[in-house]
């Protein structure tokens, strides 16, 4: 069986696991106050070109989103997000459970537009009864989106400008950031992300760590008491050095970027193979997630030897499916899939 279900079905990249094994018997202080975590934070600050940034390591994406968003918003505020956004669809109401409403915007292949953000905020304050309603307190986007699409630098700068015009922070979910950076035509860097966003995170779970996300705060007026906030949300790992060791490995010798490039290269091979065989590509994703509408009989045949997921409910005759690549996807895996087509 070959696996294309997600980018976290395998364990850790061998170089990450190697560093965990090398440091396994060492004794360090806990809660991320060790030298490995300090080194990982320094590497990330250097990579994003922001020496003053606060960096905090958490275990998972939903945990990171819920902690950061709850910490940023006032009690009467909600978070703007695409109606297809992860926090609006696939986080089991984690944001609402913290007392904050997700205020949804139209999406265009997963992306929101600056003009829609502007319109919602302007219309909100034009209504004299706005004190009775949930105020737009921040904007959430993900890079790449749930559909594998990528914001251009111009689009990022546009949504950032609208946010700052209205004095609300921009938060970027970077669970798959490495794949966006490696995408076809990507015209931005991590330094650009740090410049346009007030808070963002660099995903590790989906990029080759066993677990872990690096939350980065470039606007230091936000999340001033980050350590106790993380603790309150049950997100402070006692063996914090496990996160530091992994992220230090990821940002040594370009491993983070190499993983992204490899996965995207294999994903694009899959996309072009489906195209060559006459199958419908639902979204032109330039990243490691690929979406196809296939006849159900083709899906049933492929699933005997390849594991992948439906994207939504199974249709009567055709269904949308998703294929995802990662560091563990080999060229041989893709060769087998192409042969199956």
Image (cartoon, grey):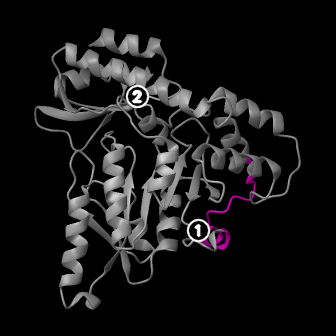
In terms of depth relative to the viewer, which is nearer, 189 or 85?
Answer: 189
218 shown above or below 308: below
Q: Which residues are magenta?
A: 227-242
Q: Which residue is mark 1?
A: 220
In terms of depth relative to the viewer, which is nearer, 164 or 55?
Answer: 164
Q: Rounded to the nearest whole Å, what is the CA distance between mark 1 and mark 2?
A: 39 Å
Q: What residue lies at 39% left-to-right and 75% top-to-bottom?
A: 100
Q: What residue lies at 36% left-to-right and 45% top-to-bottom?
A: 153
Q: What residue lies at 27% left-to-right and 15% top-to-bottom?
A: 273
Q: Which residue is mark 2?
A: 4
Determine the image quadrant of residue 13: top right
The answer to whether residue 79 is magenta is no
- Crowding near pointer 2: few (<14 within 10 Å), some, many (20+)? many
Tell me if residue 187 can be seen. yes
- Crowding near pointer 1: few (<14 within 10 Å), some, many (20+)? few
Q: Quadrant of the C terminus?
A: top left
Disc with the residue nearer the chain's start (1 vs 2): 2
């Amino acid at each position: 069986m070959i696996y294309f279900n997600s980018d976290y079905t395998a364990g850790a990249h061998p170089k990450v696991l190697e560093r965990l094994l090398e440091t396994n018997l060492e004794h360090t202080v806990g809660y991320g106050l060790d030298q490995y975590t300090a080194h990982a934070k320094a590497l990330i600050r250097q990579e994003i070109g922001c020496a003053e940034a606060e960096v905090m390591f958490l275990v998972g994406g939903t945990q990171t989103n819920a902690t950061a968003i709850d910490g940023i918003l006032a009690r009467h505020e909600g978070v703007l997000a695409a109606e297809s956004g992860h926090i609006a669809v696939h986080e089991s109401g984690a944001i609402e459970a913290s007392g904050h409403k997700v205020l949804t915007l139209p999406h265009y292949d997963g992306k929101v537009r600056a003009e829609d953000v502007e319109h919602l905020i302007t219309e909100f304050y034009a209504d004299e009864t706005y004190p009775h309603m949930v105020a737009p307190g921040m904007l959430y986007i993900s890079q790449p989106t749930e559909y594998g699409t990528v914001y251009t630098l111009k689009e990022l700068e546009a949504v950032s400008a609208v946010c700052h015009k209205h004095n609300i922070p921009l938060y970027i979910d970077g669970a798959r950031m490495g794949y966006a950076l490696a995408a076809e035509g990507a015209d931005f860097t991590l330094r650009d992300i740090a410049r346009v966003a007030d808070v963002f995170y660099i995903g590790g779970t989906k990029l080759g760590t066993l677990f872990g996300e690096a939350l980065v705060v470039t606007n230091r007026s936000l999340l001033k008491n980050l350590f106790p906030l993380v603790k309150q949300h049950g997100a402070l790992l006692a063996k914090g050095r496990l996160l530091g060791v992994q992220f230090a490995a990821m940002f040594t010798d370009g491993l983070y970027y190499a993983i992204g490039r490899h996965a995207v290269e294999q994903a694009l091979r899959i996309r072009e193979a489906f195209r060559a065989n006459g199958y419908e590509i639902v979204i032109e994703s330039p990243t490691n997630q690929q979406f196809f509408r296939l006849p159900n009989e083709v899906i049933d045949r492929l699933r005997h030897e390849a594991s992948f997921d439906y994207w939504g409910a199974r249709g009567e005759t055709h269904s949308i499916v998703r294929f995802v690549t990662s560091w563990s996807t080999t060229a041989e895996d893709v060769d087998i899939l192409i042969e199956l087509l």
